[in-house]
Amino acid sequence: MSTATSPLAQPFPALPAIDGVTLRVARAQYKKWDRTDLTFVTLPEGTSVAGVLTTSKCPSPEVEWCRQALVLGQARALVVNAGNSNAFTGHRGRAAVEAIAARTAAAMECQPSDVFVASTGVIGVPLPIDKAEAGLDAAFTAEPCGWQEAAATIMTTDTFAKGATTTVIVDGRTVTLAGIIKGSGMIAPDMATMLGFIFTDAAVAPEFLQRALSAANGRSFSCITVDGDTSTSDTVLAFATGKAGNAPLVDDESDGADAFRAALADLCHQLALLVVRDGEGATKLIEIRVEGAESDRSAHRIAMSIANSPLVKTAIAGEDANWGRVVMAVGKAGEPAERDRLSIRFGETLVAKDGLAVEGYDEAPVAAHLKGQEIAVGVDLGLGEGVATVWTCDLTHGYISINADYRS
Amino acid sequence: MSTATSPLAQPFPALPAIDGVTLRVARAQYKKWDRTDLTFVTLPEGTSVAGVLTTSKCPSPEVEWCRQALVLGQARALVVNAGNSNAFTGHRGRAAVEAIAARTAAAMECQPSDVFVASTGVIGVPLPIDKAEAGLDAAFTAEPCGWQEAAATIMTTDTFAKGATTTVIVDGRTVTLAGIIKGSGMIAPDMATMLGFIFTDAAVAPEFLQRALSAANGRSFSCITVDGDTSTSDTVLAFATGKAGNAPLVDDESDGADAFRAALADLCHQLALLVVRDGEGATKLIEIRVEGAESDRSAHRIAMSIANSPLVKTAIAGEDANWGRVVMAVGKAGEPAERDRLSIRFGETLVAKDGLAVEGYDEAPVAAHLKGQEIAVGVDLGLGEGVATVWTCDLTHGYISINADYRS
C-alpha cells in the first residue's frame, strides 16, 4: 500500500550534528520491502538518558526493556526496528529484545542495559532474531548517515520524515537539541505516544533530564491525538551526551536549567505537531483551546473529548462550522460544564455564547478559516481558570482507506 | 442528502395495538422536506411513566423538561419533533417546550407536566413555536396511524423505521409491550441514548417501572455505540397504560414482576440493536464479549474501548482479522489486564492465547466469519469473573460521507 504524502507535510529541516551521536542505518528486511528498516545510534560514555513510555496494559517487550534500563539512567546505544512492533509475542518477543541488546553490547563493549531498543510495525509477529542480528552486523560496519536518513528509516505508515532542532545557552555554552520522530496512526491521548528520539550535547543528570522530559511530554505528546488509539509500543527517549562542556544540569537551581527545560519543551512541541501533520488521512491541523474550566486537568479532558469526536473531526473535514457538535463533545466529556455559560469560536469568530448561537455572526471569516489547513477551535466554559490546548487532525476518507481498504 | 438503506436493516415487524395508546402524525415542516415530522401520542388517565435521559452536561430543554416531569410519574401525552433538536437554544428553546406542553395540555384537559416532549435533529436552532403549534393543531385532529408511520416520523438520518414487541403473562393476564426507536449517529456509551419510546398495557407503578427500565437500560442502550459521540437529546421513555387489567406491579414481590422485567429488558435489547444496525455507514453488526475481567464494570469499559476504537472498527470493515488492534484497545482501556493471560477469538476461532498468536490456527473459518454481516469478537482476560457484552458497527467510508461530505 502506498500513500500520498500528507498535504500538511513539512520539509525536513537542516539538523546539526550532536557531538557524540553517530547514526547508522541498515536493511534487516523485517518486511518485503526495498528500504532501510534498522536504525543504530551510538552514544559516548557518560550519556544520560530519560524516557516516557506507553501506559498501555499490553506493552511491547521493548517498552518493558526500556522501562527497566531507564532506572540506571545511562545509555551507549539505541536500536530501532521498523516494520514489526514485536508486541504481543510472548517469550519469543522478549528473547528477540535480549538478543539485540546482547549483540549490541558485545560490539560496543558495554552492558546490555546501556542499549535501548524500540520497534514499530505489525503487532503479534515475533521479531525474527536472525534478521535482527544480520541487520545489526551490517549496521555496525555501515558508514554514518544523516538525520533525514535515520528519520526515514524509523517510519512505517508515515508519509514524510520528521525532525526538529533548537539551541539554548546553558552555563555560557551553546547546547544543541535535535530529535526525530515517527507516528501517523494509533496516536492517542494522555501519555507518551509514538517513537521519538531526542539527542543533546548538553551535560544533564539523568534525574533532571527525566523531570524535564516528563514535564515537556505533558504539554506536547500527551496533548495530541489522531484517532484516540494508543499504541502498545509508544516510546520517547532523550539522550544527553554531555559533550557541550557545560556544568552538568542537576536540578532546578543549576545555571541554565530553566532555559534547557524550555528548549526541550519547544522541541517536544515541534515533534508532536509533526506527528499530527502526518495523521492518517489528515487534511487539516486542528488546535483546540479550552479555557475557563474548573481545572487544567478538566480543560484537558474536555479538549480531548472534542479532539477525539468523530463528528467534530468529520465536520471540520467537510469545512462545516458545525459548532453544535462541539457542544455535544463538551457535554459528553463528563467534566463540569454549564450549558448556559459556554461560548465557542472558530478562528477569531465567536459563533456561540452564553448557551446559544451568536445571532447574525459574520459567517464569511468562519468559512474562510475552515477552508484553510490550520484550524483553531476555542471553547470558554466560563467556570474557572483551567486551560488546555491539544492538537488533532480531521477524519477523512483517507483514514478509512488506510485502515480498512486492505487485508493485513 | 439521501442515504441508501442500511445493509443491516430489518423489516418493520407487525406491532400490536396497545390498549389506551393512540398514535397520530403531522407535518410541522421543521425542515424543508415533504414528510411527517411531528408525532403525537395520547395516553389514558392513570398511565405510569419512567425514563432514562442523557447524562450530557449540555442537555436539550426537552431533556430537562422530561427529567422534571418524570418525578411525578404520570403521563397523558407524548410529542416528538424530528428535524430540530432544539438543543443549545437558551431561553427561546425552553419557551418552545413550554408552549408545546401548554397547548397539548389544553387540548387534552390535563396538566402540562403530563405532557412529555422530545426533539431530534440539528443543534443550535430554536424550535419555531409557530410551526410546532400549527403541527400540533393538525395532529390533534388527524386520523390515528399505525406504529410504522410513527416510527418513520421520528427518524432523522435513520435509514429504516425501527420497532419491536414482546408479550408476557403478568398476574394471569397477557400484557403486551411495544416500542419504537430512532438513532443512527451520535450514538454513544454509558447512558440512555437516542429517542426511544416504549408502551405497554400492563398496570405498573411508576417507581417499579423506573427501576425496571433503568436495569434494562444498563444491559441494552448503555451497551451500544456507533461513534462514541453522545447526543444532547438522548431520551428513552416507557409508558404503562394499565389497560391489561393485571394487579399493578409495585415491587419485586408483585406477581409477574420478574417476567415483566425480563420482557422489558428483551424489548430494550431488540430496540438497541436496531439502532446499531442503522449506525451511520454500518455494513457489519459487531458483538464484543469480554470475560474474565476483574469486575463487570471493568469488562464493560474494556468492551467499550474495543467498540470505540477506530482501528478495530476499520479492520472489521476491511474484513481483516487484525487481532493486534484488539490487544491495543484492551491495553489502552486503563483497566486491569495482563498481556500474557489475554486470549482473543473471532467467531468461534481462538486466534491469540496467553499473550501471543495461536500458532497455525485455521484462518479459513475466521475469514468466512469476517465476510458475514454479524461479527463476534471475544476477549478473555483470565483475571476474574467480570463479563460484559456490547454492540457496535464497523467504521466505513459511509460514515465519513454522511458526516463530512456536506455543509450544514
Image (spheres, coloured by chain):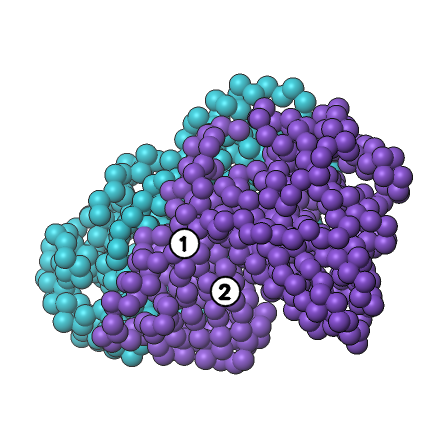
Chain colours: A purple, B cyan
Q: Chain of mark 2?
A: A
Chain letter of the residue beneath label 1 in the structure image:
A
Residue at (47, 30) in percent of width and height = A1
From what the image shows, is residue B70 above or below residue A144? below
In which quadrant of the rendered view does residue A141 lie?
top right
In this rendering, the answer to whether B344 lies above or below B269 is: above
Left or right: A222 as drawn, with respect to A238: left
Residue A385: x and y in percent read 54, 80
> Where is mark 2, residue-wise?
A303
Can see residue B74? no
Q: Nearer the viewer, residue A381 or A387?
A: A387
Q: Secondary structure at mark 1?
A: loop
Amino acid on which the number 1 mark rests in the picture: Lys
Category of crowding for the residue at label 1, using alpha-carbon neighbours closer than 10 angstroms: few (below 14), some (14–19), many (at least 20): many
Q: x%, y% of residue B194? A: 37, 55
Q: Is residue B113 left or right of residue A382?
A: left
**Which one is earlier in the sequence, the residue at label 2 or at label 1?**
1
Give above or below for B5 relative to B105.
above
Q: Is residue A336 visible?
A: yes
Indicate the quadrant where residue B81 lies.
bottom left
Q: Which mark is residue A284?
A: 1
Q: Residue at x 50, y 64 (%)?
A: A303
Q: Amino acid at mark 2?
A: Ala
Nearer to us of marks 2 and 1 is: 1
Which structural element holds mark 2?
A: helix
